[in-house]
Image (spheres, rainbow, N blue to C red):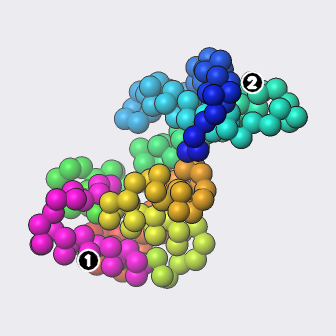
């Protein structure tokens, strides 16, 4: 996120109540993992800050524009989290072999064998990525970069896009990856 000026900080701070208002009026808080009030509040505050950075007074009142920006960001976040919680296949658990490659990045202090496994998984993701175009291709690239240890901020900055856009790419990438029987077989998982 860009550094906020003092005026932008004051604008966001003066309108923090919008985040609470949007959550209470527009969002169903289910208290499932990653869908608690605190999760939505944090995401809403980030959206409010982005709105303050982009705000142009000639476009209207900040509160009206920020309400819409926060609402859309929270709806995107809710949809993104709900997809994982309601997918047809259950989420992999920690003991499941599917857990490591798709949901967790490797520890930077890996030994030679583990690094070889990370490189092998990255190769499979890159091969899969090359079979697609557009959002699925970018999503698989982001998954690969995240798996290799890049932070989400580095990824969004390198593409020059919002975190919501990157989450959309990742969603499409996961969808095609889970349907790609060749890649799933190479990763040692049933498609």
- Does any portion of residue 158 appear in the rendered image? yes
Q: What stretch is highlighted in magenta?
A: 103-128
Seen in the picture, residue 39 relative to 106 is either above or below; the reply is: above
15 relative position to 158: left or right: right
- The residue sitting at 15% across, 68% down in the picture is 114
Furthest residue to the right? 58
Q: Nearer the viewer, mark 2 or mark 1?
A: 2
Residue at 47% from the left image edge and 24% from the top image edge? 37
Residue 63: mark? 2
Q: How far apart are marks 2 and 1 (CA)?
A: 49 Å
Seen at 46% across and 69% down, the residue is: 141
> Residue 44, how many percent across, how many down?
56, 31
Taking the image as shown, residue 106 lies to the left or right of residue 169, namely left
Which element type, helix, strand or loop, lies under badge 1? helix
In front of the other: 158 or 188: 158
Q: Can residue 18 be seen in this view?
A: no
Instruction: Give the quadrant of residue 107.
Output: bottom left
Where is residue 86 shown, x and y percent of the image? 44, 46
Is 174 in front, or is 20?
Answer: 20
Q: Magenta: predominant secondary structure element?
A: helix
Image height of 93 relative to 145, above or below:
above
Residue at image point 41% right, 36% down: 34
Q: Which of marks 2 and 1 is nearer the N terminus?
A: 2
Q: Residue 58 carries which label?
A: none
Query: Looking at the image, which is closer to me, 157 or 71?
Result: 157
Q: Mark 1 points at which residue?
A: 120
The C terminus is located in which quarter? Answer: bottom left
């Amino acid at each position: 996120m860009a550094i906020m000026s003092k005026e932008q900080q004051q604008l966001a701070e003066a309108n923090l109540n919008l985040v609470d208002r949007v959550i209470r009026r527009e969002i169903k808080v289910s208290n499932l993992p990653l869908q608690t009030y605190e999760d939505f509040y944090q995401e809403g505050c980030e959206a409010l800050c982005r709105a303050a950075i982009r705000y142009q007074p000639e476009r209207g009142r900040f509160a009206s524009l920020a309400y819409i920006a926060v609402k859309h960001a929270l709806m995107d976040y809710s949809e993104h989290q709900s997809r994982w919680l309601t997918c047809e296949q259950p989420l992999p658990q920690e003991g499941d072999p599917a857990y490591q490659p798709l949901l967790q990045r490797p520890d930077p202090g890996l030994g030679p064998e583990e690094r070889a496994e990370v490189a092998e998984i990255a190769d499979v993701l890159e091969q899969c990525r090359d079979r697609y175009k557009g959002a699925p291709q970018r999503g698989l690239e982001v998954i690969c970069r995240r798996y290799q240890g890049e932070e989400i901020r580095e990824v969004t900055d390198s593409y020059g896009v919002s975190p919501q856009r990157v989450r959309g790419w990742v969603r499409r990438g996961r969808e095609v990856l889970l349907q790609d029987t060749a890649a799933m077989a190479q990763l040692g998982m049933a498609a």
